[in-house]
Amino acid sequence: MADTVETDLITLPLAGLHAELGAKFVPFAGYSMPVQYGLGVLGEHIWTREKAGLFDVSHMGQVRLPKAALAGLEGMIPADLLGLAQGRQRYGMFTNDAGGVLDDLMIAHRAGDVFVVVNAARRAHDLAHLRAHLSGVEEVTDRALLALQGPLAEAALAALVPAVAAMRFMDVAVIDWQGATLWVSRSGYTGEDGFEISVPVDVAEGFARALLADDRVAPIGLGARDSLRLEAGLPLYGQDMDPGISPVEAGQAWAIGRARRTGGARAGGFPGADVILDQVAHGAPRRRAGLRPEGRAPMRGEVVLFAEVDGGAPVGRITSGGFGPSLAAPMAMGLIEAHVPADAVLYGDLRGKRLPVRQVPLPFVPPGYKR
Amino acid sequence: MKYTEDHEWLSADGDIVTVGITEYAATQLGDVVFVELPEIETQVAKGDEIVVIESVKAASDIVAPIDGEIVEVNDALVVNPALVNEDPTGEAWFFKIKVDDPAALDAFMDEDEYKDHIGE
């Protein structure tokens, strides 16, 4: 059953606290992860949209690079990293020579180094990839990573560390809490305002308990994290992006810096630049679309999409889907062939029946970022 | 009340058997957001997948526990799938089946056997 913990899974530093809080655990990317607590996925999702949700994302990879590696890192990623000011964080993607996505990551330019956070499932891959191109790559293994997300996240975190109130979206700061050094960024992956906080493992539980002592804060599992990010239109590596999907197809062309585009100061110079910049200029074979199944049945990943209710070849597929608790309706993202009109009704093959799906703009829920 | 290894409960009234899922199953599923029920007057065989139930986590099937004909379905679940979590063994019954052989019910677990089955 879903709550069986396999013995070869890695356990989070705060596993004991999660168990005490009533978590159900599932295997995810080699880790035993809390998927939900007592509120349940729907309740946790709504809580995060209205208050502040505390997520343990310690499974994600934390990596430090010397500042001198920033130029080399830019050569692996289509983002403008040399233009990234100190104290700021930027989203980027590792690309391959075919123009596909190897992983997505956050890059923070700090006073003394560059701090990078990568997906758990790609931690080993990304470390090897970084070490193949850069020197001084150091994995951070003595820190937990927490995220506090929601409209009351600022108030709840500022009650412990007041300096966070002055941060704006994608700012990073190093802040003291009771003698421990917190690495804080004003970011997250829920569409809400909030913070990600790297905290030394030996004080992580105390810090988490201090946050949870606030009535506005509840622990939130992976289940709600997925529905929150999907409603926010945020793609997930391994589903909406992979080595066979380009950043342009995945709807992430915004993360290709102006300086890295054709005609820019440092145009190209990243793997797959020829393919990706051609797609920026002339369009990609497929595009990401927001999708709303018209009935009540959720359509999840790998549902095949057609232009006609009968016959015809597939014109796309769903890459992520489920039920949107804030929408109170099913929602999905998919890859659609570029020739399909953006306002065409599509049909998803669900258990042998073709059911209508509307294409809609993303995100499903407007973001609450404090810019 | 009788129970299946697939965590369904069966409540018989003559040859009409009402079928739902157990509290244990509802908890394991999580918040139910969608239910699709079979057509009335469908002949079903034991093991046929006749109900689709989707929680926030995943899609699952509920199988016909016994041979017979579907005589009634609980449309309230289609309108309000959350009923499955709120009252799984009461208001959230799924369908009623007119069984071909009422004696076949004897093969299912009773409450004590089911509790052993789920380790309670």
Image (cartoon, coloured by chain):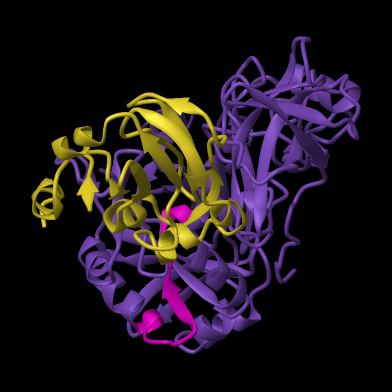
- Chain A's colour? purple
In which quarter of the view is residue B120 placed? bottom left
Q: Is residue A118 above or below residue A307?
A: below
A351 versus A225 height, above or below: above
Residue at 69 percent of width and 48 percent of height: A233
Viewer-side residue, A228 vs A200: A228
- Does residue B41 appear left or right of residue B21 in this picture? right
Quadrant (top left/top right/bottom left/bottom right) for the N terminus of chain A: top left
Q: Position of residue A238 (x, y in %)?
A: 52, 32
Q: Residue furthest top?
A: A312
- Quadrant where the C terminus of chain A sits is bottom right
Q: Is residue A212 magenta?
A: yes
Percent of width and height locating residue B4:
23, 41
Horizontal side of A29 relative to A314 (left or right) equals: left
Residue A299 position (above or below residue A96): below
Position of residue A208 relative to residue A190, above or below, is below
- Residue A71 visible here: no
Q: Can I make out residue A323 in this image?
A: yes
Along the viewing direction, whichever of B98 and A215 lies nearer the viewer: B98
Q: Nearer the viewer, residue A132 or B24?
A: B24
Q: Residue furthest front?
A: B14
Which chain is the one coloured yellow? Answer: B
- Residue nearest the observer in this picture, A155 or A260: A155
The segment highlighted magenta reads A210-223
Identify which residue is drawn at 60% across, 59% down.
A325
